[in-house]
Amino acid sequence: MPLVIAHRGANLEAPENTLPAFERALAYGVHGFENDVHITADGVLVVIHDDTIDRTSTGTGLVCEMTYDQLMQYDYGSWFSPEFSGTKIPTLREFFALCHDLPLINVEIKEEPNGSKAAAAAVVQLAKECGVFSNLLVSSFDMEMLQGCLAEDPTTRVAFLYAMEDPDMCEEIMDCPATFAKKHGLAALHPFITLCSGNFIAECNAAGIMVNPWTVNQEHAITALRNWGAHAVITDEPALAMGICCA
């Protein structure tokens, strides 16, 4: 049965990528989390999806141009609901502290507007320091970021994220996922859900490649991935997915 990975935590019940969202997901018994990571101007890894803090905080500005202390001046919960007023941006270290009992910790490293790849090595180093490296799976749309993780430690498990926005890449993967994974040192592929099929997952499973589609929120899609043998489903609906995948 596939693992259930809570996408940005239980993000329909609490502000995405915050400790309350991850804590709520834990209450459903999920097998892992997916989050998004950027690195600050002073080298702190923080959990946030966007390049800027504009959408999910009371502040404005690029994460990569702000220090951690500057980021901590703002509220990251009240945009979602007054219940979460005062919520702060979590560091990746704080996030890892919640993860010790989870079999899969999916950290997505975002591309930085300034082109920095510093987050790659920093994520690997921090996962080791926090004792969660064995459960870590680093994903990214940026292949150079994944190569940076492998350069830091060749045993890092990395996963390539992709969608239809890059049809040439999709075609290369679909032609022979095993060749593509071997070429780039990938442990997993993270396709958008519409790029999945039973035959594709079976081919990947035969080659020892994990397939963890995103973002899977409908009952029929979760059921199909369970039946096709997906390694995990990345979902905004952890309660629904747990009911299907663990039945």
Image: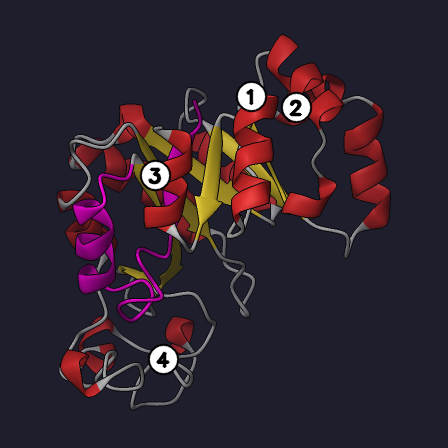
Q: Nearer the viewer, mark 4 or mark 2?
A: 2
Q: Nearer the viewer, mark 4 or mark 1?
A: 1
Where residue 240 sits in the image (x, y, percent)? 38, 47
Reading the image, the residue beneath label 4 is 56
Q: Which residues are magenta?
A: 1-30
**Is disc 2 surrounded by few (<14), some (14 to 19) or many (20+) residues within 10 Å?**
many
**Alpha-carbon distance for marks 2 and 3?**
20 Å
Q: Is residue 34 visible?
A: no
Reading the image, the residue beneath label 2 is 201
**Please, is residue 186 above or below residue 87 in the view?**
above
Marks 2 and 1: in contact by CB < 8 Å? Answer: yes
Give whichever of 17, 119 is nearer the camera.
Answer: 17
Amino acid on which the number 4 mark rests in the picture: Thr
Marks 3 and 1: in contact by CB < 8 Å? Answer: no
Identify the image quadrant of the N terminus: top left
Which badge, 2 or 3, is on the more N-terminal residue? 2
Amino acid on which the number 3 mark rests in the picture: Met
Amino acid on which the number 1 mark rests in the picture: Gly
Reading the image, the residue beneath label 3 is 242
